[in-house]
Amino acid sequence: MEALISGEEPLETGEKTRAELEGYQRGMTYIQALADAGDDFRYDAGLLNGLHFMLQGHHLDKRPGRWRDGPVYATSPNDPLVPAYTAPEQADVPL
């Protein structure tokens, strides 16, 4: 990942990994660009949605850049049918 962030070609990556790394690079570069914004900078829903799209824009089926409209969970590495974590209900998470 360090190679890609510094502008070098990574040694060996598949397309999926490359897309993930490039999204991460875009998001981190944007945050670095905002670092000197001073009093003009504000964390808000638009910033979070934009960062989410930068990171996950190659997964259009996962609604990148938009608030979730259903449950969120992470599955167990041992069994993808077993939720290891279930997020709070959408209505319980303030915007």
Image (tube, grey):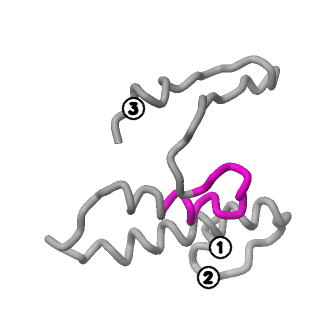
Residue 58, image quadrant: bottom right
Q: Is residue 21 left or right of residue 46?
A: right
Q: The residue under label 1 is which amino acid type?
A: Ala
Q: CA distance from mark 2 to mark 3?
A: 37 Å
For disc 2, the marked residue is 7
**Chief secondary structure of the magenta span?**
helix
Quadrant in which the N terminus is drawn: bottom right
Q: Position of residue 3 (x, y in %)?
A: 65, 73
Looking at the picture, does residue 80 appear above or below residue 9? above
Q: Which residues are magenta?
A: 51-64
In magenta segment, residue 58: yes
Q: Is residue 51 left or right of residue 57?
A: left
Write the residue at 63% across / 28% down: 73
Q: Position of residue 55 (x, y in %)?
A: 59, 60
For disc 1, the marked residue is 3
Q: The residue under label 3 is which amino acid type?
A: Val
Write the residue at 37% across / 78% down: 33
Write the residue at 31% across / 57% down: 44
For disc 3, the marked residue is 93
Mark 1 crowdedness (10 Å alpha carbons): few <14, some 14-19, many ≥20? few
The secondary element bearing badge 1 is classed as helix
Mark 3 crowdedness (10 Å alpha carbons): few <14, some 14-19, many ≥20? few
Q: CA distance from mark 1 to mark 2?
A: 6 Å
Q: Is residue 89 left or right of residue 84?
A: left
The secondary element bearing badge 2 is classed as loop
Outermost residue to the bottom: 7
Quadrant in which the C terminus is drawn: top left
Nearer to us in this view, 7 or 17: 17
Nearer to us in this view, 70 or 77: 70
Outermost residue to the top: 82
